[in-house]
Amino acid sequence: MSSKQSQIFYRRRGSKELCQEIVLGGRLMKWAYDHRVGRAVFSFLLFRRRIFSHLMGLYCDSARSRRQIRSFIDKLKIDTEEVLQPLDSFVSFNDFFTRRLKPSSRPYDDAPRAVISPADGRVLVYPRIEQDTVVPVKGRSFTLSALLEMAAGDFLNGSLAVIRLCPADHHRFHFPCDGEILTSRLINGFYHSVNPIALASRISVFTENKRALTLMRNPLLGKVAMVEIGAFGVGSIVQTFTGSHAVKFQEKGYFKYGGSTIVLVFRPHTLTFSADLIENTAEGYETFLKVGERIGTGRSGT
């Protein structure tokens, strides 16, 4: 197995330069999903059994895990100047992992028609879904029916954005637009990694993993679906929002330790994605955005 096989590249907004992602355990991940023995041991025993993610979550919540914070910062080159609290105030690894940032570090696009990224992450966009089926640039195709279950009918032929969070990213997520909350529910599932190495395997990560589904209604866009997808090592998806009407950029919740993903689904002809996201996706690259940056512009309600 060559080291190049486990390398991941992406772009930052405003630049065509390729950035290499720092992947924790990239070679092991490649073996776990591509090798026959790896698939048997890791994919089945670890990723399909919630007990391992649960135990990891317990450790990351413990005071003992606090010693991992500094090495985590150093390995992933996390900018601690953005962190709201002093580093010595965190009582566990998860306390740091779910850290809040200084408000000045994450301004947001408050234009009325702007739809924003709900989290820091690497973004792929799909301007038009063919009926029910999404064919990703990286990964196995999946259907809206599997992702959204009974709610899929409203979004056939719509559009979709995938925001992938890495361990280094800020793991609190926010609402991409204003909206009335119609329904929220948890869909149980497995704990596969959302790393592109796993997405490129034969596993339907987005539709097999545990996820939280929220349907909301925006005056301009009509119905919008927001799906938070758990992954290996994610102790839980925590919802901090409890109201019935959300405001754009308002905090919705956070992921505990692990890489995670958010999928946004829009009805047909309601959103125009930003040109750079469309271009980078077509070329096979994710675009790194910070929470609050525009991913698209609303066109009309339905």
Image: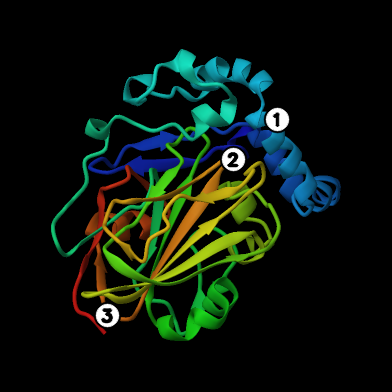
Real-space CA distance between mark 2 and mark 3, rounded to the nearest whole angstrom: 34 Å
- Residue at the limit of the structure toward the front, as seen here: 243
Residue sitting at x 68%, y 52%: 192
Residue 1 in view (yes/no): no
Identify the disc placed on residue 150: none
> Please, what is the three-letter code of the amino acid marked with disc 3?
His
**Helix, strand or loop for disc 3:** loop
> Please, what is the three-letter code of the amino acid marked with disc 1?
Tyr
Mark in the foreground, 2 or 3: 2
- Residue at the limit of the structure toward the left, as seen here: 111
**Helix, strand or loop for disc 2:** loop
Mark in the foreground, 3 or 1: 1
Q: Which residue is mark 2?
A: 258
- Tag 2: Cα neighbours inside 10 Å, few (<14), some, or many (≥20)? many
Height in image: 84 above or below 39?
above
Q: Are marks 3 and 1 in contact (CB under 8 Å)?
A: no
Height in image: 179 above or below 76?
below
In the foreground, 207 or 58: 58
Real-space CA distance between mark 2 and mark 1, rounded to the nearest whole angstrom: 13 Å
- Tag 1: Cα neighbours inside 10 Å, few (<14), some, or many (≥20)? some
Residue sitting at x 53%, y 29%: 95
Identify the disc placed on residue 59: 1
Q: Which residue is mark 3?
A: 269
Q: Where, quadrant-wise, is the N terminus in this rendering?
A: top right
Height in image: 3 above or below 231?
above
Real-space CA distance between mark 3 and mark 1, rounded to the nearest whole angstrom: 46 Å
> Please, what is the three-letter code of the amino acid marked with disc 2?
Gly
Q: Quadrant of residue 93?
A: top right
